[in-house]
Amino acid sequence: MEIASISEAEWVRLSEVIAHLWVLSGLLIGAGLSYILAHGFIASLALTGDVDEGAARRVRMPLYAIALLTFVAAVAVGVKGLVLAIEILPEIFPRMII
């Protein structure tokens, strides 16, 4: 594999790919924490009787919605970042196969 020299425009596009990776990781962490809070902690509190079942259900439903929305946003950002990476790779590695 032969690496071509990288121009300023390609560095800008690479920084966009890295920014997408940061946003993707933040969204996945947010989705995971929301899901764990709703499905693990609040459900456990409801099962042990520390929190009323009705109150737990009212708190869990919005958290599930937040987890779903952040996961869908993470998929969208991940696909966009992948498309950006696929567009720039042939410019950096003009000969991908040895």
Image (spheres, helix red, strand yellow):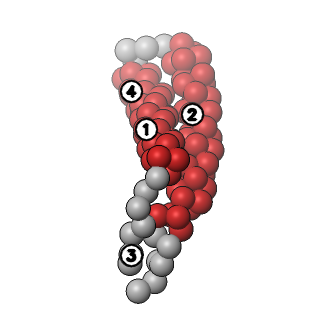
Image spot of residue 34 (x, y percent): 47, 29
Q: Which mark is residue 2?
A: 3
Q: Secondary structure at mark 3?
A: loop
Can you tell which mark lies on residue 22?
1
Measure how far apart labels 2 and 3 are at the Cα level. 39 Å
Can the viewer see residue 91 in this picture? Answer: yes
Viewer-closest of 35 and 97 = 97
Tell me if mark 2 has few (under 14), some (14-19) or many (20+) residues whose alpha carbon lies within 10 angstroms of its own. many
Q: Is residue 28 visible?
A: no
Q: Closer to the observer: label 4 or label 3?
A: 3
Q: Nearer the viewer, mark 3 or mark 1?
A: 3
- Residue shown at 43%/57% (left/top)? 6
Mark pair 4, 3: CA separation: 51 Å
91 lies above or below 50: below
Q: Nearer the viewer, mark 2 or mark 4?
A: 2
| Residue 48: percent from left, percent from top | 36, 23
